[in-house]
Image (spheres, rainbow, N blue to C red):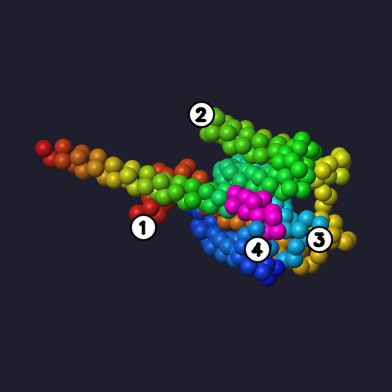
Amino acid sequence: MQFESLSDFIAMGGYGFYVWLSYGSCAGIILGLLFSSLYENKKLKQEVKSQMAREERIKKAKELEAQV
Amino acid sequence: MWKWLHPYAKAERAYQLCNTLLPYFAVVSVLCIVVGWVWGLAYAPADYQQKDSYRIIFIHVPSAILSMGAYSSMAIAAIIALVWQLRNAELAVIAIAPVGAAMTAIALITGSAWGKPMWGAWWVWDARLTSELILLFLYLGVLSLFHAFEDKKAGGKAACILAIVGVVNLPIIHFSVEWWNTLHQGATITKFDTSAIDPTMLWPLLINILGFAALVGALSLIRLKNEIVQVEKHRPWVRQLVSRG
């Protein structure tokens, strides 16, 4: 361990702002990309599901119409 | 080889391959990045000249290397897409581009946060910085070109051509510190004869580079899966996949 205390660690020998700005923005960009990709995946699957449900409804309505 | 590769031209097989590979990439990237960051931030010794500000190196160098590495793989996928007309390769180009753009943005942001305390300026129009900025624009250009066309086929082709042409920028970035007078320091670890960095700093750096490489792989795989589902969403196998949960 290179630092005596937690406040020492955060201060980074006076360069705290620049170091944490770098690590923070790096983590932010990576997590942002990760979550937007995962969200996109969820949305796509939802889209396919609702399309399937829609086709099911159309099929049922057609069957009903044929019976009448 | 063709016989072995051919099944992966099918979207479903490619999707399965992504699923198989993804856990390995994810585990390696999380492990390496956690270890690399803790080691780099807390345990690596301070630099004798730059003190603790040099700790930015542990994300700046990996993201810069991977911004070029991702571009090379994107360009290779683009060549495959154009020559063999494989749609999966084209989707890979579009999947890698945002990940590469993120790496380039990280390299630029961490670079300026490092430049401010060391050079006294957030940004200088120096060869290395400018060519890296052009790399970011190339990524964004590939992405917007792909989405700019009504006809997806034309858009894919245009994006692939731009990706291939943009490769000329890679050697410019790499050699910019030798060809021009620059504020940016020269290569540290790619000089194979004598590495200019102490092992206590080199190890966490190498671990971070490996972690970032795995991260680029994992994110690209997640995005490639999305792209495959997007173009195949009316196919039965996607429907089976979705209804299975």
Direction from residue B100 to residue A62 in the image, left or right: left
Residue topped by disc 2: B150
Amino acid type assigned to the residue bearing label 3 in the image: Tyr
Q: Residues within 10 Å of mark 2 (few under 14, many from 20)?
A: few
Q: Position of residue B218 (x, y in %)?
A: 57, 56
User: Which range of residues does the magenta coloring cover?
Assistant: A12-25
Residue at mark 2 shares a chain with residue at mark 1: yes
3D distance between C-alphas at marks 2 and 1: 33 Å
Residue A23 falls within the magenta-colored stretch: yes
Tell me the element at label 3: loop
Residue topped by disc 1: B244
3D distance between C-alphas at marks 3 and 2: 56 Å
Label for residue A8?
4
Examine the rendering and report whether any part of residue B16 can be seen. Answer: yes
Subunit ID for the residue under disc 2: B
3D distance between C-alphas at marks 4 and 2: 56 Å
Examine the rendering and report whether any part of residue B228 can be seen. Answer: no
Amino acid type assigned to the residue bearing label 1 in the image: Arg
- Quadrant position of residue B142: top right
